[in-house]
Amino acid sequence: MSYSFPNSVVDFIRSALTEDIGHGDITTSLTVDAGAIAEANVITKEALVLAGLPFFALVFELVGRGVGRGVEVRTLREDGTVLVKGDKIARVSGSTRSLLMGERVALNILQRLSGIATLTHSFVNKVRDLPVKVVDTRKTTPNMRYMEKYAVRVGGGGNHRFGLYDCVLIKDNHIKAAGGITKAVERVRRGVPFLMKVEVEVGNMEQLREALKAGIDVVMLDNMSIDEMTQAVALVNKRVTVEASGNVTLDNIRQIALTGVDIISSGYLTHSAQAADISMKII
């Protein structure tokens, strides 16, 4: 498996291993010979959309570097595959001590990301036949954003901005601090690169009208009712991209999509995804 990892991901996994192993795995060092070799199967215990194999493998690579005994991860499935209970995901072989020391961190990541991909897949399936994109938000686990946004993509969704640095999104507190939507947009336009789009969050029709007049590129309809969103889409009339956000659920996402919005963003994809049930068993 060939994959390029940002330094932040490598540092995060190293930190997670340090948190778990500390100055040494007491149980493993006392029960397993230093030269012991083993194989283990990674198996899903429920239906899921698989995500996170590159990071799973990286855990064992880093463990091997630390103890001098490597582990080979042979993947049997690809990320994005829909699996059923009992499916084998990967075969892990090498130093028994390395297997046991990396097991928990590797599984935690694989379970977390597969949970996000599975939930995202469910959301996307609700609106698959409609011209709308389902995307995530910045409501991610600290230091896991790169991996969690990867999982959203694997599940069929898209990514909103990655951080505060790669997109202009004027929210309610910015508007309040700047003295209004118009003033906020004017200040942004004076300093932002001309290729960067400007998005403004609005909560009612009055704010929407002001935002359109100010010359925005994208409008976020925040926590609006279905009727309000329908009116907003009609008012915009395709002049700018329309994003719907706030209280998006599996029960209402299709209704939201039918209003005609272009994008539906939901923090639920990441902050409320339940970890998938995956295990690793030594053969």
Image (spheres, rainbow, N blue to C red):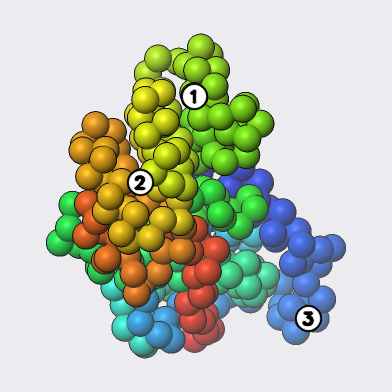
N-terminal-most mark, 1 or 3: 3
Compare residues 111 and 244 and report the one nearer the observer.
244
Asked whether the viewer can see residue 156, the reply is no
Compare residues 15 and 153 and report the one nearer the observer.
153
Tag in front: 2 or 1: 1
CB within 8 Å, label 1 to label 3: no
Q: What is the CA distance from the residue labelled 2 to the residue labelled 1?
A: 19 Å
Residue at 26%, 38% (x, y): give it. Answer: 236
Q: Kindly give the residue lying farthest to the top in the view shown.
A: 190
Is 264 situated above or below 199? below
Q: How packed is label 1: few (under 14 Cα within 10 Å), some, or many (20 or more)?
A: some
Q: Kindly give the residue lying farthest to the right in the view shown.
A: 23
Image location of residue 275, percent across then percent down: 52, 74
Image location of residue 146, percent across then percent down: 51, 48
Is 168 situated above or below 271? above
Which residue, given by chain and number where applicable, does mark 1 sit on?
182
Is 52 situated above or below 235? below
Which residue, given by chain and number where applicable, does mark 2 sit on?
243
Which residue, given by chain and number where applicable, does mark 3 sit on?
27
Q: What is the CA distance from the residue labelled 1 to the residue labelled 3?
A: 63 Å
- Quick one: SS at disc 3? helix
Tag in front: 2 or 3: 2
Tag in front: 1 or 3: 1
